[in-house]
């Protein structure tokens, strides 16, 4: 299965869930399939799972999706242990495993040789709801389960290599951050951005 | 290990300044502070395995509306340099870095880490205070939080044994 068809298959079930998407092809494709200020891009390879964990801990009543990749997850494999430790009920972590560093030119990753079992590692790290999927139907089932049951959830999605032809991201990381935070403020009814007041307004 | 009084002073300063989530990787000199964090009900404590993970957790926590701090040794500051650069600085994330200053004058371990700590912070463009006076702990923490908020950047507090 291709990542793009997977994204198209799960998009109709998404409403207000938040998405943290890895430095890689999943970001452009997801924003093309489901444009939303509830999507935040990541620039540090591997850090999406940790950012998603922090977001899930900070908003425990909100479902948080992380879109990871096999190269990115290899770089921060310890994050699975940390997620297993903290058990965020609302975290849904999907690793799009195309068995290569696609954004770096297709070099092999730890997954290329076929020895590693990401779902098994996640389960052994304490993420009980962990499974590998190989078809779009299996993926839809796994996402549907994750959205209606407490997690944390981990889904290793085995996909073909290849990126869909989609438009580039509309917003750089700063504009993306501001829009994302405003979206969280609006949908959660809370104030996050603190705008400093000029000193003259603080005079009594 | 630090002292209970020093640890309590820092914890009180963090709470007074509005910090409500602390990610951490331990150091022996912050044992008392970590013990307090494990017991505290007001501050969410998120132990992580490696410091760069903590920068990610703090970033996500900020996006969720928390005001986060990352507690680590200065060796961990080096471990987190890419996350600080391409996430915290590039996205403009206010986070307070509470860093035990190993290899400081008078410290008998990790002298190389101590040697590069301040130049690395300067190279990253992260403002910092070296905390040596227990009487100024709360003021220094409040100042770091104010600047982190205003600049939307990480600000570092280098904790020496004198304040722990």
Image (tube, helix red, strand yellow):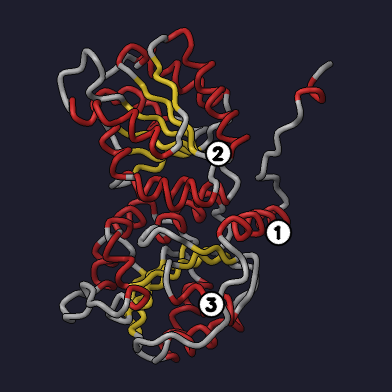
Which of label 2 and label 3 is nearer to you?
Answer: 3
Q: Position of residue A49 (x, y in %)?
A: 40, 60
Query: Quick one: SS at disc 2?
Result: loop
Count all numbered tags in the image, as a single digit.
3
Chain at tag 1: A
Mark 3 lies on residue: A30
Vertical relation: A176 (above or below) A195? below
> At 55% across and 46% down in the image, what residue appears?
B92
Q: Position of residue A50 (x, y in %)?
A: 40, 55
Q: Which mark is residue B95?
A: none
Chain at tag 2: B
Query: Quick one: SS at disc 3?
Result: helix
Mark 1 lies on residue: A187
> At 43% across and 53% down in the image, what residue appears?
B86
Q: Position of residue A31 (x, y in %)?
A: 57, 75
Vertical relation: B135 (above or below) B10? above
């Amino acid at each position: 299965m291709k990542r793009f068809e997977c994204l198209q298959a799960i998009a109709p079930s998404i409403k207000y869930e938040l998405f943290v998407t890895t430095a890689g092809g999943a970001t452009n494709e997801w924003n093309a399939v489901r444009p939303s200020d509830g999507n935040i891009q990541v620039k540090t390879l591997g850090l999406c799972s940790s950012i998603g964990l922090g977001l899930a801990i900070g908003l425990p009543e909100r479902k948080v999706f992380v879109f990871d990749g096999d190269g990115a997850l290899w770089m921060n494999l310890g994050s699975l242990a940390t997620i297993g430790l903290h058990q965020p009920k609302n975290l849904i972590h999907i690793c799009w495993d195309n068995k290569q560093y696609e954004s770096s030119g297709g070099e092999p990753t730890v997954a290329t040789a076929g020895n590693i079992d990401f779902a098994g590692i996640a389960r052994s790290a304490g993420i009980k709801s962990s499974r590998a999927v190989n078809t779009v139907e299996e993926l839809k089932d796994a996402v549907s389960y994750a959205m209606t049951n407490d997690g944390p959830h981990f889904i290793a999605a085995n996909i073909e290599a290849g990126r869909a032809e989609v438009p580039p991201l509309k917003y750089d990381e700063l504009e993306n951050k501001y829009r994302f935070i405003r979206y969280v403020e609006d949908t959660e009814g809370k104030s996050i951005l603190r705008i400093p007041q000029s000193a003259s307004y603080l005079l009594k | 290990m630090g002292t209970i009084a020093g640890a309590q002073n820092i914890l009180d300063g963090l709470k007074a300044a509005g910090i409500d989530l602390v990610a951490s990787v331990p150091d022996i000199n912050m044992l008392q502070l970590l013990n307090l964090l494990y017991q505290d009900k007001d501050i969410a404590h998120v132990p992580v395995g490696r410091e760069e993970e903590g920068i990610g957790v703090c970033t996500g926590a900020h996006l969720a509306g928390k005001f986060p701090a990352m507690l680590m040794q200065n060796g961990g500051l080096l471990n987190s340099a890419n996350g600080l650069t391409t996430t915290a600085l590039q996205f403009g994330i206010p986070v307070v870095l509470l860093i035990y200053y190993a290899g400081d004058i008078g410290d008998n371990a990790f002298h190389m880490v101590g040697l590069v700590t301040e130049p690395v912070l300067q190279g990253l463009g992260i403002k910092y205070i070296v905390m040596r006076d227990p009487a100024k702990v709360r003021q220094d923490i409040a100042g770091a939080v104010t600047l982190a908020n205003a600049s939307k950047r990480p600000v570092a507090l280098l904790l020496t044994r004198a304040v722990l």
